Amino acid sequence: MIRKTIKILFLAYAIISGVIAQPKYEFRAAWVGTVGKLDWPVSYETDEQKEELTDMLDGMESANMNAVIFQVRPSCDVFYDSEIEPWSNWLTGTEGNAPSPYYDPLHFAVEESHKRNMELHAWFNPYRVKKSTWYSNGVHSDHVYKKHPEWILSSGSDKKSGLIEENYYGLDSWGLEKNPTEVTYYLNPGLQEVRDYVLSVIMEVVNNYNIDGIHMDDYFYPYSGITNEDQQTFEDFPRGFTNIHDWRRDNVNLLIAAIHDSINIVKSHVKFGMSPFGIWKNGVPAGIVGMDAYNTIYCDPINWLNNQYIDYITPQLYWEFGGGQDYGKLMPWWADKAMSNERHLYTGNAPYRIGDWHNWSANELPRQIRLNRDTDGCQGNVYFRVNFGVLDNPKGFLDSLENDFYQYQALAPQMFWIDSIAPNAPQNLEFSQNGDDHIITWDKPTAASDGDTATRFVLYQDLFKPVNINKPENIIRIIDGSLDSISVTDLSIGHLALTSLDRLNNESEAINVGEVSIDVPSQLARKFQLLQNYPNPFNPTTTIPFIVEKRTKITLAIYDINGRKISDIIDDQEVNAGKYEFNFHASGIPSGVYFYRLQTDNFMLNKKMLLLK
């Protein structure tokens, strides 16, 4: 939800040993599972479904997340108005029935996500048809299971290897009931007509919806394993292969290549991402052991990267540091493979394991985020799942995102291989004040050489000029591209800048307005004041307010109990008279008493604050 009132603070990120600054470009997403009504919807009622979804998106926006991975086709049934496949039974309670009163959930999700400056990636399961324990109301006559039984393969138990997910309390990692005798039905990847069918399903969405990405997960060949179920298909359509295992991998590769090519022709700005199982091959990299994507589910993501069929890879790295599935080994390996092929890595992370029987430490996910940020080639995270692992705040994980790792807004990373042309800058940025309202206006830019205009604008403010647009802490608001003015309240003294963004977050040069002079009540500016920080005690962020009575040079610094300086927040910079607030971020230092000092040429003020972790 776009906040009606925005309090704009000039934020200074503490320069502390061991702290990795928050990036301006970072993918921050969560999976929204609809299979089995995992995350959404709870209700079958239209109004309640809309409210559930907007509440979920509000929570993600509050945490400064910028993308939603929304499951739209869990098992050859859909959460959008399709001419190919039936409405999902998990949406309405009966497969094939449209919502009543009618609405299109995918269209609604796209519109609501974009209102909150979040991308929406439509998440497809390409081959999964159904399981024997699903669909108590029966399979709809328009379901592919009924229309094309000749396309369907089946395998026995869907129980996964213990190296992936232990069988606990009769549930799998999704929270769905396990059944040792359950049969899995899936489309036969070896048939050309199946690959064409899946492609048509995906392209229906690409053509008809304003999505930002297509996303597929690891459900290709079944985890339960395949033996001779597709032997006849292999003999009928070998395509020159003599090894059935290589043939199966090529079946998947053909589909991935076809999706890539079709998206590029129809809507080249739509991103294509894949989320494979987190181990490519057993023993790769050295020390990694376990079931792998290459030999069990016949997925070869290194082939997809080498051929640049995909724009980003999101391996499901649902493990801790250490052991045979060491996050500290797997993530840098994937980052190297993505970077060497000039593609992005957004890791798939498992905060659900904080709150389930794995009982991960509260420090595990923060440690993984820090390693991601400190590793070349890794540009973000996707969390499984949004309602069980993120928004339910297990062991304070959501708090750590909001108050620490995602304290500032970030833009989704640019993909220069798709589009590297920046939009033209807006023009004639102006500022005026009418009581408490601060009015900012501008002229929209002309089209760039590729025909793109601004899809959004970014408003920055900085105490000093020129405005530094590379610091995420200087972002005030990301604005819809249809607007040419906004009204905000509680601006502080400083300088404003505005840029244009295109669909892929290429950014124009900044245009600036002169120093913003905000009326300061006379009683506040009668003398220099250093006020008490808040909150106090704090962890890990606190706000330090002070008042300056006239234009002067100031220094604001943080010291430990022994008088050692640990951070320069403002270093001998000239400011105007007024009230200021700066954030101090202390995630890299231990608990204890600290002092902050405001100093000018003529005086020095000190106050004490307490960090409790």
Image: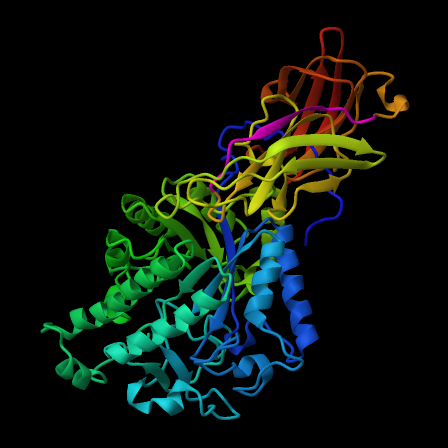
Note whether residue 359 is visible.
Answer: no
Q: Nearer the viewer, residue 58 or 533?
A: 58
The magenta stretch is: 506-519
Which quadrant holds the C terminus?
top right
**Relative to 26, does residue 347 appear above or below in the rendering?**
below
Q: Residue at x 38, y 78 (%)?
A: 128
Res. 172 image quadrant: bottom left
Q: Nearer the viewer, residue 19 or 206?
A: 206
Q: Residue at x 42, y 63 (%)?
A: 215
**Relative to 543, does residue 183 appear above or below in the rendering?**
below
> Does 167 sit left or right of 339 as displayed?
right
Residue 3: x %, y % from top left: 71, 49
How many marks do you count on the picture?
Answer: 0
Residue 22: x %, y % from top left: 52, 38
Note whether residue 390 is visible.
Answer: yes
> Does 80 sit left or right of 483 as displayed?
left
Residue 239 belongs to magenta span: no
